[in-house]
Amino acid sequence: MLAFVIRRLAQAFFVVVAMVVLVFFGTYVIGDPVWMMVPGDATQEQVEEVRRTFGFDQPVYMQFLTFLGDVLRGEFGRSYVHGSSAIGLILDRMPATLELALAALILAIVIGIPLGLFAGLKPDHPVSRGIMAVSILGFSLPTFWVGLMLIMLFSVMLGWLPATGRGPVISILGIETSLFSLEGWRHLFLPALNLALLKISLVIRLTRSGAREASLQDYVKFARAKGLSPRRIIGVHILKNIMIPIVTVLGLEFGSLVAFSVVTETIFAWPGMGKLLLEAIQRLDRPLIVGYVMVVVLLFVTINLIVDILYSALDPRVRLTGSQS
Amino acid sequence: MAEPVLAVDNLATHFFTRDGVVKSVDGVSFTVAPGEVLGLVGESGSGKSVTGFSIMGLIDPPGRIVSGSIRLKGEELVGRTEAEMRAVRGRSLAMIFQDPMMTLNPVLRIDTQMMEAVHAHEKVSEKAARDRAVQALAQVGIPSPEERLSAYPHQFSGGMRQRVAIAIALIHRPALIIADEPTTALDVTIQSQILAEVQKLCAESGTALVWITHDLAVVAGLADRVAVMYAGRIVEQGRVDDVLDRPLHPYTHGLIGSVPGEAMPGKRLAQIPGSTPSLGRLPPGCAFEPRCSRAVEACRAGAPPLAEGPQGRAYRCINPVPAEEAA
């Protein structure tokens, strides 16, 4: 198990190194940020002055080495726009995004697995057909449109839930969160549902196909021949088998929930990282973009590692190969 | 004769598919006495497994028991609700499956799978259930059962897994076990070990056995009586020695002839030409008629009636194999 974790950590390290290189040169070729920083009527001298201050007069490899040095110290420079540390800005906004992604993930599991199980175990039931039809909508409707519709229905027409912003935050163990107040949940629900919609559909389809396959297996027939109750057969025998692909996919999807919360955060004016990124891209705020991408890369790498470990906890056959190596 | 453990009477299980009704089991009758071993023999698709699942009440839609009766220790099973069947399954009626690689849940430990079988029918403590599981494993010859109990199925060999499945089937000392080709997927050496083990355990506990197989050699060594199925019907049944020594139905005769050990070395093996008919489109007369070397005009007219002889001997053929050919 330990050897397995170390090997995976080494792989993760190389992924991060590769991403550092890609991110630097990727943003380098986007364009010269100086023109975004100086006023339109600036003189050549003023432009050169700004260029020197930020080190853009240096050759590319020097800039890259400076960048590497910063990265090693966990710094991505100061945001050109905000003037403060880029990583600081991102970390400030991260709890809001993580909160949103987590709530979306929970919704995906709580809604997706029961519906998927039902559709998988009773494939010919009219309700199952309904579930599958809705899940197709979940896949194909654009997130931003669904977000707007949710606001229209629940905030404008029914007036049940607030349309924008985040609820009051409380600091718990140094983390700012809105999860501990009713008002916080009221603000969180719509954006989380919006973000979760695609994942709910995904979980429904995964669970359904898994359940359909598992319910035909001999071990299910044998469990029935033992006289077990349907609840035990579905809840233990079938569910534990189909959790393996679901955990894998959901783990990987959690990264994308964080990374692609951009749209949802913009629509619901949710003060998270995604909104910050969008602003940074508009203003070519290089340190902020780089910082964001690096944070997301680290997040993905960490999640993958956790998924691998969880996977081996769920499937005993994986554990065996891990301990042998 | 004592009251039979199992009495199946005129059982019909049909599958209502889009391509029409498939009569997998159509008018099957047999009985099993306490402690008796009945070999249920036939080719793939002859309906022998469906018969087994019908007795267990494990026929899923589009399949359904359309008529007939299944009595276990005198009590009718057909028409019971799912909950009522669940109380019988695993308790007085157990089943062992063909592929031991597939019958145990790969992600649950052996102790979980054995203890849940105990708990399904008896309210006992965890400790008591565990003790029962250890006992059952020891009974089927698994060394150091306490340790093996916390292993996962993939850590066992095929033969060991089948022993675990047998241990689970025996855990409530059922009156009857239905064994659906439980040794087919195993090595020959393991196969004979398992056979001997099952024979011994059933004799000890007085458990009757319906042994579903296509292997006549297994039946010859294990069964007291044999029923030969073809296209959803029992075409011949009787005491195992009688049937194997003196087959009356041409199909039984052909089956026996197909066993390699029976042929002279160097000679071509006998075979039954053709394959089992599609159950959706059976010929109007005897289902075996198109493949039968002894078919006469009357065979095509209608299904042959059941002819009964002494000692439970019965067959469905109007032109049975004469004695001189059978030998």
Image (spheres, coloured by chain):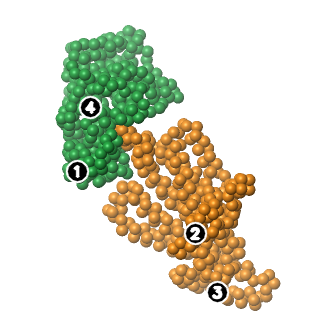
Chain colours: A orange, B green
Give the percent coordinates (x, y) of residue B79.
42, 26
Position of A296 with respect to B145 (left or right) is right
| Alpha carbon distance from label 4 to label 3 | 88 Å
Identity, as a three-letter code, of the amino acid under mark 2: Thr
Residue B145 disc label: 1
Decide which of tag 3 and tag 2 comes sooner along the chain.
3
The structure residue drawn at horizontal position 62% and vertical position 85%, both measured from the top left corner, is A59
x and y, in percent, of residue B149 in the image: 27, 51
Of residues B159 and B173, the one drawn nearer to the viewer in this rendering:
B173
Q: Are marks 4 and 1 on the same chain?
A: yes
Give the position of the C terminus of chain A as an image quadrant. bottom left
Say if mark 3 contacts mark 2, CB within 8 Å: no
Residue B230 visible here: no
Other-residue count near label 3 (Cα within 10 Å), few / some / many at <14 / 14–19 / ≥20: few
Mark closest to the chain's N terminus, 4 or 1: 1
Q: Which mark is residue B175?
A: 4
Taking the spot 48% from the left edge, 30% from the top edge, the residue there is B62
Q: In the picture, residue A143 is in which quadrant?
A: bottom right
Q: Amino acid at mark 1?
A: Pro
Q: CA distance from mark 1 to mark 2?
A: 51 Å
Question: Which residue is tagged 2?
Answer: A177
Instruction: Give residue B324's mark.
Output: none
Residue A268 as seen in the image, left or right of residue B42: right
Mark 1 vs mark 2, foreground winner is 2
The mark lying in front, picked from 4 and 3, is 4
Residue position marked by numbered label 3 in the rendering? A55
Chain designation of label 2: A
Q: Residues within 10 Å of mark 1 (few under 14, many from 20)?
A: some
Tell me if B220 is positioned left or right of B61 in this view. left
